[in-house]
Image (cartoon, rainbow, N blue to C red):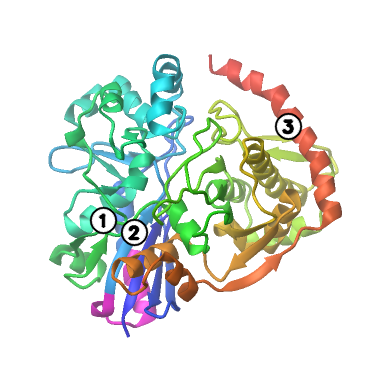
Amino acid sequence: MKYLLGVDFGGGSTKATLIDTTGKIIQENTVEYPTYYPNLGWCEQAPADWDIAFSENVKGLLEKSGIDAKDILAVAIDSATHTWVMCDEEFRPLRPAIHWTDSRSRSQVEALRNRYGDLIYEKSFHRPDTIWTLPQILWVKENEPENFKKLRYIFFEKDYIRYGLTGVYCTDYIEAQGSMLFDCNTNKWSEELLQIAGITEEMLPPIVKPTDVIGKVTGSASLRTGLAEGTPVICGTTDTVMEVFASGAVHPGDVTVKLATAGRICVITDKPYPNQHLVNYAHVAEGLWYPGSATKAAASSYRWYRDTFGGDYQELNVGAEEVPIGSEGLMYHPYINGELTPYADPTLCGSFIGIRATHTKAHFTRSVLEGVSLSLLHSKKTLESIGISPSDKATIIGGGAKGELWRQITADCLGMELVKTVSSDSSLGSAMLAGVAMGVFADYEAAVKACIEVESVTKPIKENTEKYERIFEEYVAVHDVLAPIYQARNK
């Protein structure tokens, strides 16, 4: 038997999925790595931690599966978009990687909007925001000039990890779309946007297709990771499109609801929908796009809550199940890193509103779950307002989808039937992508048929949906009152 390996790098952990050539999942493994918050609004990760986590993850997976690494046909890596690494002429990192959730570049965003907003929107299909690489490069240029002078190469997260396997410097066009340095009309790096950033095209990786075999595992990488020397390595792409692929969404009209580090509702379309409230990316399937709305802190809200106040997810969920809809007046807004849809406002802050002496930890837990789901409802309404109407059925993806309670809350908030597959992890999508690249699967649809299996279906409860619609009105009203206060703090 031969195998395909996909490895995902998410907000704070790497997951590996091994499948055989029939599409069956053989083994999975996960290793966490740290995120650093050295200053208010900063969010960084160390590239060395990624390399260590990758090696531990793959070695652990190989040990658990008991397979011979020589039987792996190919490996593909994906990661969160926008997270970038600046390197010197020897490809050594000059500083920690700035994560896409970092919000330090607010003043650069404002300057870009005022001076180049129309040009940037025309080229990238997006408005400047702190999640994009362009304003983050400008922050480094203005605040760390010595590092900027030494800058010779820019990597994106999965490309840096893959470079350690192959020594090949490149990226894919979907990743490039997430940099705000790419012209989505011509599918090339934009000379105008590079000039704004103060960099040259030589500092950016050559662009290839996600399915291209870009190199092979080197001898040194083999010793470090346990992979067989000479194993083909696929370029790979971004985590969200791999989740979309792994959910089975490969046709126009298919919908995914994501509860991962960020939360998203994506509708597969045959064209992009440039809009200030949406994030537009190409699908791996040629000619398709997955424009989507996004809430910035979904599962990361729940992880922050767990890490800050203690407990484990199972224990927290059990308590929250006993709390009625609406958490008896307690409301949470998940703006702990600012917010994307529909505000694109990095100054927003998270909040608990309506606290009473009768509220328990279980109330706070449920309010976090409800607050994220209400933000997704806001995203859904935004899509509907611009003519992209999601159907009443979607596949739910991301780590947060594992919790039955959260799936039901989300189904009720959205008024949508949510289908959960056995796995929709990005790492499965990358393994499937490797299969397409190597000819194991004839095309993307064939990969879906071979690999995707439905596990459960969560149907919305009509009376709950009606209750959440009323709560949503208060949810928006609270934002409208607090937003000017947060914005004034940052002037």
Q: Is residue 56 above or below residue 369?
A: below
Q: Are marks 2 and 1 in contact (CB under 8 Å)?
A: yes
Q: Main secondary structure of the magenta part?
A: helix
| Foreground of the two, 33 or 329 | 329
Gap between marks 3 and 2 measured at Cα: 38 Å
Is residue 417 inside the magenta stretch?
no
**Residue 490 appears at what percent x and percent y?**
54, 18
Pointer 1 residue? 162
Pointer 2 residue? 77
| Foreground of the two, 365 or 491 | 491
* Numbered tag placed on residue 129 in the rendering: none
Secondary element at tag 1? helix
Secondary element at tag 3? helix
> Of marks 2 and 1, which one's residue comes earlier in the chain?
2
Query: Relative to residue 161, is residue 28 drawn left or right?
Result: right
Binning the other alpha carbons within 10 Å of mark 2 as few (below 14), some (14 to 19) or many (20 upward) gives many
Gap between marks 2 and 1 measured at Cα: 7 Å
Residue at point 51% right, 58% down? Answer: 251
Pointer 3 residue? 476
Stretch in magenta = 56-72
